[in-house]
Image: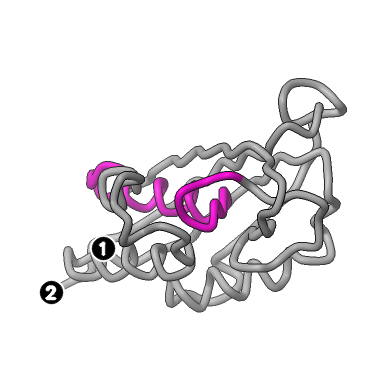
Amino acid sequence: MRIGHGYDVHAFAENRKLILGGVDVPSEKGLLGHSDADVLLHAISDALLGAAGDGDIGGMFPDNDDRFLGADSLKLLGAVVDRLSEEGYSIGNIDATVIAQKPKLAPYILQMRKNIARVCRVEENAVNVKATTEEHLGFTGRCEGIAAHAVALIEKKES
């Protein structure tokens, strides 16, 4: 068994959709990024790659490569899962926390979990997503952006 941790942050931006966990969350602003800026899926991807000792999503999907401009982060996560599978790993579980003062995310968490579980080829109960605020403290508390942390457990498949 191996464990990895992922962290990502993106600033809010005008004229962008807010995509979290592959869900289009209604919001006045979206997140700025080269891809769709799905901070939750980026943290999960980093946790999985970290557990496998495979670097991070910046190395796998560089932000100076136009092939990934506006990319759907569910597809990027799928490519990470494929890579781990090719290396003989299966995902045990994922636990993630989204840090956002607003919007409120509770209504969207179940769909986020379903999306992540589907792409990661695990049962829904192997994926946990939580949301919290920072009580108006820091950049997330001032509504300047959103951050996410994730941990993932992977296991080497028996041959």
Instruction: Tell me if I can see residue 50 in this picture.
Output: no
Residue 50 drawn at (x, y percent): 32, 44
Q: Circle 2 is placed at which residue position?
A: 159
Residue 104 drawn at (x, y percent): 85, 52
In the image, which residues are magenta?
A: 32-56
Q: Nearer the viewer, residue 47 or 12?
A: 12
Picture residue at 75% right of the left edge, 49% below the top: 29
Q: Secondary structure at mark 1?
A: helix
- Asked if 144 appears above or below 48 in the picture, the reply is above
- Is 36 a magenta residue? yes
User: If you read the primary sequence from the N terminus, does the residue marked by circle 2 or circle 1 appear first?
Assistant: 1
- Asked if 63 appears above or below 113 in the picture, the reply is above
- Is 47 a magenta residue? yes
* Mark 2 neighbour class, 10 Å CA radius: few under 14, some 14 to 19, many 20 or more: few
What is the three-letter code of the residue carrying label 1? Leu
Picture residue at 32% right of the left edge, 56% below the top: 66
Picture residue at 82% right of the left edge, 38% below the top: 101
On screen, residue 112 versus residue 95, left or right, reads: right
The quadrant where residue 92 appears = bottom left
Q: Nearer the viewer, residue 85 or 65?
A: 65
Picture residue at 70% right of the left edge, 53% below the top: 15
Residue 43 drawn at (x, y percent): 49, 47
